[in-house]
């Protein structure tokens, strides 16, 4: 696929992030491939996959664009998403269409600029995972094809409940090609992002993290007290003469 065809195929669409909880029962290559294929059948425009080996397996099983990342927990740095040159090369070798890279302005083992240049030299598009407006501007100046709100709210302090639609809007107003990502956990929020001009929107947890979604519903059920429930006898009294 050409750069234009990859981006065109994502425009106005949904990207599904198939990233199970680490070491959970769904954290298995075959399960992730099945998730990815199911998302494609459901109409996903693209997929976001963690791990070079896993991304390569998914790429060979689907026909839609794959965004690849490698997550690392480094002892001296807070950045986690595709932060080493070897990660860029491994993802490129796996055949991904786009590589997402942490674009935050934080200490890192390799400069963001270096990683972007390497990805482009390997013929792969770049998505910048940003946390604020200025990072997106800088990433766009470096030629990143997609600017993501991925890390907004995740670089310190309490994590908000809602997605950062203001950031998405601010970027789209100046013409950036924006990937709305990060806490888009409802169909309404996805629609809002696209109406604000986002190029596409990524949803992960709400689709592919069964444990987390189950916990949401369990918490909602437990929060319901007996006082909130209409008892059958009282319900009947409402309708009987």
Image: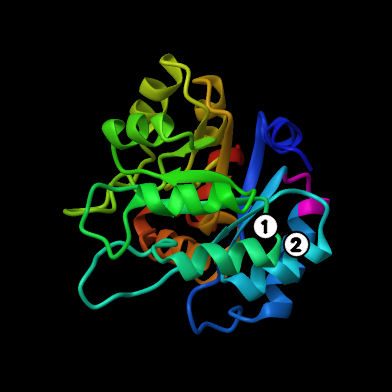
Residue highlighted by disc 1: 96
Residue in the image at 60% along x and 64% along y: 91
Q: Nearer the viewer, residue 133 or 122?
A: 122
Q: Residue at x 73, y 66 (%)?
A: 58
Residue 104 horizontal/vertical position (percent): 29, 48
Q: Is residue 222 visible?
A: yes
Span colored in magenta: 40-44
Contact between labelled residues 2 and 1, with CB atoms less than 8 Å apart: yes
Label placed on residue 59: 2
Q: Tell me what residue is drawn at x 56 percent, y 38 percent.
A: 201
Q: Which circle, 1 or 2, is nearer the viewer? A: 1
Residue 63 spot, x, y in % from top left:
83, 52
Task: Let me know if residue 240 is in the magenta part.
Answer: no
The furthest residue to the front: 121
47 displayed left or right of 176 = right
In the shown orientation, is residue 224 left or right of residue 127? left
Residue 178 appears left or right of 72:
right
Find the distance from the CA under tag 1 to the CA under tag 2: 7 Å
Q: Quadrant for residue 172, please give it.
A: top left
Quadrant where the N terminus lies? top right
Which residue is painted at 76% across and 38% down in the image?
A: 2
Can residue 70 be seen by looking at this rendering? no
Q: Earlier in the sequence, mark 1 or mark 2?
A: 2
């Amino acid at each position: 696929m050409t750069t234009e065809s990859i981006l065109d195929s994502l425009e106005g669409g949904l990207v599904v992030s198939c990233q199970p909880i680490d070491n959970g029962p769904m954290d298995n290559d075959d399960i992730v491939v099945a998730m990815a294929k199911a998302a494609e059948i459901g109409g996903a425009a693209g997929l976001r996959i963690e791990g070079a080996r896993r991304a390569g397996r998914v790429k060979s099983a689907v026909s839609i664009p794959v965004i690849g990342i490698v997550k690392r927990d480094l002892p001296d740095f807070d950045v986690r998403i595709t932060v080493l040159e070897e990660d860029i090369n491994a993802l490129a070798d796996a055949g991904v269409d786009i590589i997402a890279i942490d674009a935050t302005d934080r200490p890192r083992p390799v400069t963001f600029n270096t990683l972007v240049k390497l990805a482009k030299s390997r013929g792969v598009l770049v998505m910048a995972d940003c946390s604020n407006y200025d990072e997106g501007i800088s990433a766009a100046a470096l030629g990143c094809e997609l600017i993501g709100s991925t890390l907004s709210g995740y670089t310190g302090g309490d994590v908000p409940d809602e997605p950062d639609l203001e950031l998405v809007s601010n970027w789209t107003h100046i013409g950036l090609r924006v990937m709305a990502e990060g806490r888009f956990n409802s169909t309404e929020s996805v629609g809002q992002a696209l109406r604000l001009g986002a190029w596409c929107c990524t949803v992960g947890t709400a689709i592919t993290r069964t444990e987390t979604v189950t916990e949401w519903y369990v918490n909602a059920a437990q929060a319901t007290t007996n006082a909130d429930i209409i008892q059958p006898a009282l319900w009947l009294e409402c309708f009987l003469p």
